Image (tube, coloured by chain):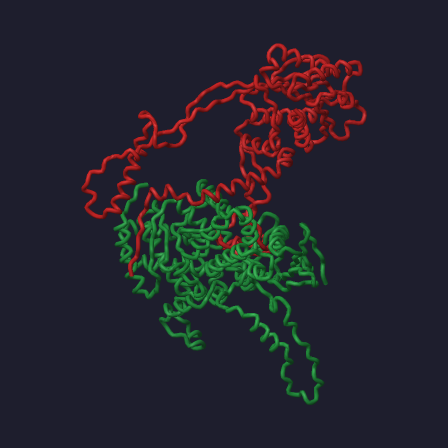
Chain colours: A green, B red
Amino acid sequence: MAESYSIADLQQWNERILELVQRFGLSIYPQEFEICDHEQMLSYMVYSGMPSHYPHWSYGKSYEKLKTFYEYGVSGLPYEMVINSNPAIAYLMRDNSLALQILTMAHVYGHNDFFRNNFTFRTIRAEFTIEKFKTHADRVRRYVEDPSIGLESVERILDAAHALSMQCQRNLSIRRQTVQEQQEQLLRESEPPSDPFRSIHRPKEYTPPDLEKVPLYPDENLLLFVRDHNPRFAEWEKDLLTIVHEQTQYFIPQIETKIMNEGWASFWHKRIMDNLDLPQGIRMEFMVRHNQVLAPSPGNINPYHIGMKVWENIEKRWDHPSADDEREFGRRKQTGLQKIFEVREVDRDVSFLRRFLTEDLIRELKLFEYQTRGNDKVVSRVADKENWQDIKETLLRNVGMGTVPVIKVEDADFNKSRTLLLKHYHDGRDLHLEYAEKTLQYLHQLWGREVALETIINERKSLLVYSDGKLTIRNIA
Amino acid sequence: MDTVFRSYDSSSAQRSDRSAGDRLRHRQKVREAIRNNIADIIAEESIIGKDRNRIIKVPLRGIKEYRFVYGENTPGVGQGAGDDTQPGQTIAQGKQPAKGDQAGDQPGVDYYETDISLDELVELMFEDLELPHLERKQLREMEVEQQYRRKGYRKIGIRVRLDKKRTARSRVRRKKASQRSHGDGFSERRFPFHRDDLRYHHTVTEKRRQSNAVVFCIMDTSGSMDTMKKYLARSFFFLLYRFLCTRYQNVEIVFIAHHTEAREVTEEEFFHKGESGGTFISSGYAKALEIIHERYHPTLWNIYAFHCSDGDNFESDNAAALKAAAELARICNLFGYGEIKPLGSGYYSGSMIQYFNQIQEPNFQTVQIQRKEDIWPSFKTFLNKDRAREDAA
């Protein structure tokens, strides 16, 4: 398709959009747009939008998959892709129409603002994003080319690291304590609570905490733990684990704020487009595209749709508070904008939905809960009076990092045999056993000794032990 | 603050196929996974006699990306399309492909059933064999074609092979380099071609060798050979034929069906026509020898013969069969006898294997096939004989 617009057109529209962005009070990083074709877009999708990324076969696999899906029309390509960096970089598809490009640019500024202001992204040094991925790529390539290491060895570590990478700290704003701080805390905790009647009570016997235990508190950063506690690793192996860990950490805020972020960008592209004074043709096309993107996808969750609905709802409820709200919570009229700017800063998906997904909204969005039976999804609850809260709870468990089981390192010297003991913090959802086995195998490879995972299978407490190339499952009391 | 627009640059787009390396590596892993499962694939998939361009679906293990994920008892939340969503309603059949989320939160579709063409599969199968060096006698190989092929570029060469485009390009390159070192005002000057700019095609001559092989498929079509036995035999012949196709340029195939007497038949007849009657194994061998004398002189052809039977033979024919087999083994590169005895059928019928074990020729091999799963291992044993002979020589 011939391009029906020039860069100058885009620049001109961009000026007008920027004007609105400033008027509405969005605070953004400088923006860069890059025009690309669909092949490049596929590549960017595969490599998370990074201009430079370390090589691994799994990216080749997802490229093939995406390309197949794209070519057979199973799924289209995104109109846009933004990466969280400073300046923010966004890719625009060359073949899109002008209307779509304007819509996309407006949408991109929404993401840009979100990246810059939401608390989850604070820990990421956006100005170094591109360089960081670049140096990671360079380092991995160097190890691959090093004749004493080579592709196979690098791949072995990366395969294992990828399997465990999501097992890491979820809320990056919580500072990790040093070992010394942990020891101090442990000592504080072990002291008996002060007892006002100690003159008549027999003093409880004091048992000193075990300050030598590793780890002192359960540790959720699996890769880092293994890196720091397996003395047999060479420097390059440690470095690979670090690289995979750091890259995962970069994506965690995005996973944690998917619904908010997409909702926020949709909310703003709508508002910007409505205020742009678009020519008739562009306006019509925008409406069509907007409705396509925002359409609920039956049976699934469309983060654009749900996110935007919630944002609109917050604005409405703070702009026009009910009499109750005004009386009980002191909510003032016309404070909607102020409220949503506050929320976009301090929330992530779980807290966002917990605080603002109301009963009415759940019903309006026609949310329901399903269970998987064999190959089918069967509706188990619909949003009626009794069930809406359960549906909400289920949803909250399935957003952000909620889809990744919480597994922490409990003990690096389990049974005094250097067995690495993990514990799955079970919340009613069992692990997929085949996947657990294979993942433990990877962990075993990294740890170099027996590994064990405590979990619950079919309501029985079990210990999965991986050693000597096989998995044994023991029931424990 | 300025917004930067980077326009589309088609030349960089063409150059930057950045995932090429990772795709290649992935492809290698797929092939590796197939190779590790070949015995299963051959046993499960009826690839026998299929069109060579046919696409085969091969289930793959080993290239999934495993993580800790939740299993089946995990409820989820979806959005309804209308007001009438009711508990108990089935909303989706089958698993949906997980959307391209970072988290990869579901085990997802096991789309890792990959498509592979029969040719590719066959190639992989024989890579798995670690390729026995088949005997190829000098005479049986002919140099047929001499071809010139372009290969690379040189700075010296003859006029007719001058590559104008590359020459011009290297001049431009040199010009740019000089501009940089000389600064402004340089572009005014004339910048002629220099001898160093010239680029010539380099050509190499290629000799292609032609080698001929003929496969004799000899099968017992007596009444005792039922469908299952025929299927096993057919699988074996198929592998042999495919394998030789990868080794020799020109492979011919001769089908001989025999009961008490032997006939040369077409492939169709060979596999589908049932016959009945008793069995004279020697008749099949005699026919093969006859055809070899007529059409395939052993100095020009690499001869492979394989005989499938259920081991039932008239007692009176055993001595003759032994003699013919020994003679065939002397002529052929490789001669094999496969006895097909599906489990549970072999109690009462006789076996030729003990007779044939008397044959001392090193390139004669007997195998016993009881199940589909035996085909691949026995095929390997069969071919190893050929290699063993090579090593001995």
- Observer-nearest of B378 and A309: B378
Q: Name the spot of residue A90 as percent of width and height, x first.
A: 37, 54
- In the drawing, does residue A149 fall left or right of residue A310? right
Q: Quadrant of residue B73?
A: bottom right
- The quarter in which the N terminus of chain A is drawn is top left
Taking the image as shown, residue A323 lies to the left or right of residue A229, namely left
Quadrant of residue B278 within the rendered picture: top right
Task: Identify the residue at image location x=78%, y=15%.
Answer: B319
On-image quarter of the C terminus of chain A: bottom right
Q: Residue furthest bottom?
A: A199
Residue B119 visible at all: yes
Can you name the residue that lies furthest to the top here?
Answer: B294
Is residue A455 in sight in this rendering?
no
| Residue B342 location, quadrant | top right
Residue B90, given in percent of the width and then of the height, sits at 56, 50
Identity of the residue drawn at 75% across and 17% down: B322
Indicate the position of residue A307 as horizontal and vertical percent values.
44, 60
Q: Residue at 57% x, 72% y: name it.
A: A182
Determine whether, in the image, residue B71 is placed left or right of residue A246: right
Q: Residue A442: x percent and y percent?
A: 60, 52
